[in-house]
Image (spheres, helix red, strand yellow):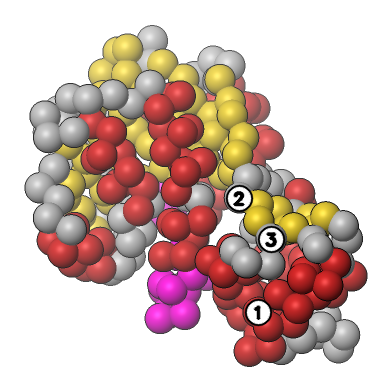
């Protein structure tokens, strides 16, 4: 059940992950509350990365609860540093592959964002992780729907880049429509029919975090897109942000980044 995270953890990818944490913060917090996280809970955050979801969960469970993040990559060192800088005493992090993870006692909730799509067998992972939750507890996971990215009104350059990003992710072996499949995956794992919610960050030309996030995704996949012959009519990564902002301003346009779909169940 080891991850097959193909995007790496170079400095540029870490910057993108931190931007992602800010861009999806409100939607993720809302989804965790809807899923049933509440003060006093003991929570396991799977694929915790730089810690943003863990920190959100820690805010919800409060000082009488705790959150433990686990990630197979050494990015846990960054998560620990951020926790220390922010003075968070109810959050901890461990570097471990999921199939090597052992808990001393069951938790009240297992959560994760953008992790199942990187696992070779997400159904088996869901089944095993649900087994770490005490009866009545919560299993909640969020994944994206990349194909739903749009600009309103349509900006041809953004559409071309978005299509190239989608094809690049597919070339990496990633399912660009993974989020909408969560309902079926939960049922295949024997967890029943989950409740689900969707939230998407959307903004205009003045939303610098959102536009920078879009540009950093393009930077991430540009070498793959170039290898696929998809970069002839699109801007280079260094030019993406300024050109996107200019075209959005001219068209009075907004962009919607990948909707985040969250599914959750209460463990029987």
Label 3 with label 2: CB-CB less than 8 Å: no
Horizontal side, residue 96 vs residue 224: left or right: left
Where does residue 144 sit, x and y in percent of width and height? 61, 47
In front: label 3 or label 1: 3
Horizontal side, residue 59 vs residue 47: left or right: left
Q: At numbered mark 3, what does the secondary structure look like: helix, strand or loop?
A: loop
For the residues marked 3 and 2, what is the alpha-carbon distance in whole angstroms?
11 Å
Q: Decide: few, some or many residues near mark 2? Use Cα within 10 Å; few <14, some 14-19, many ≥20.
A: some
Q: At numbered mark 1, what does the secondary structure look like: helix, strand or loop?
A: helix
Where does residue 101 sit, x and y in percent of width and height? 25, 45
**What segment is highlighted magenta in the picture?**
1-17
Residue at label 3?
Answer: 204
Give me the residue at 66% from left, 56% from top. Answer: 203
Q: Decide: few, some or many residues near mark 3? Use Cα within 10 Å; few <14, some 14-19, many ≥20.
A: some
47 up-or-down from 191: above or below: below
Residue at label 2?
Answer: 201
């Amino acid at each position: 059940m080891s991850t097959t995270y193909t995007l790496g953890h170079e400095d540029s990818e870490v910057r993108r992950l931190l931007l992602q944490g800010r861009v999806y913060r409100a939607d993720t917090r809302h989804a965790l509350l809807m899923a049933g996280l509440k003060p006093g809970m003991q929570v396991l955050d799977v694929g915790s990365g730089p810690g943003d979801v863990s920190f959100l969960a820690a805010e919800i469970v409060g000082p009488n609860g705790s959150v433990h993040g686990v990630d197979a990559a050494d990015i846990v060192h960054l998560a620990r540093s951020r926790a220390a800088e922010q003075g968070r005493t109810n959050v901890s992090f461990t570097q471990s592959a999921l199939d090597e993870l052992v808990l001393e006692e069951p938790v009240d909730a297992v959560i994760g964002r953008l992790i199942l799509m990187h696992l070779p067998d997400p159904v088996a992972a869901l089944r095993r992780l649900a087994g770490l939750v005490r009866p009545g507890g919560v299993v909640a996971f969020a994944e994206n729907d990349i194909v739903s990215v749009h600009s309103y009104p349509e900006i041809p350059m953004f559409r071309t880049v978005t299509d190239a990003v989608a094809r690049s992710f597919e070339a990496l072996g990633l399912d660009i429509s993974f989020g909408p499949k969560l309902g079926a995956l939960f049922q295949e794992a024997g967890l029943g029919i989950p409740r689900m919610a969707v939230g998407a960050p959307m903004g205009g030309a003045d939303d610098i975090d959102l536009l920078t996030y879009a540009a950093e995704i393009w930077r991430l996949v540009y070498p793959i897109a170039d290898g696929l012959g998809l970069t002839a009519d699109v801007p280079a990564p260094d030019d993406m942000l300024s050109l996107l902002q200019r075209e959005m301003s001219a068209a009075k346009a907004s962009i919607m980044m990948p909707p985040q779909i969250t599914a959750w169940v209460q463990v029987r």
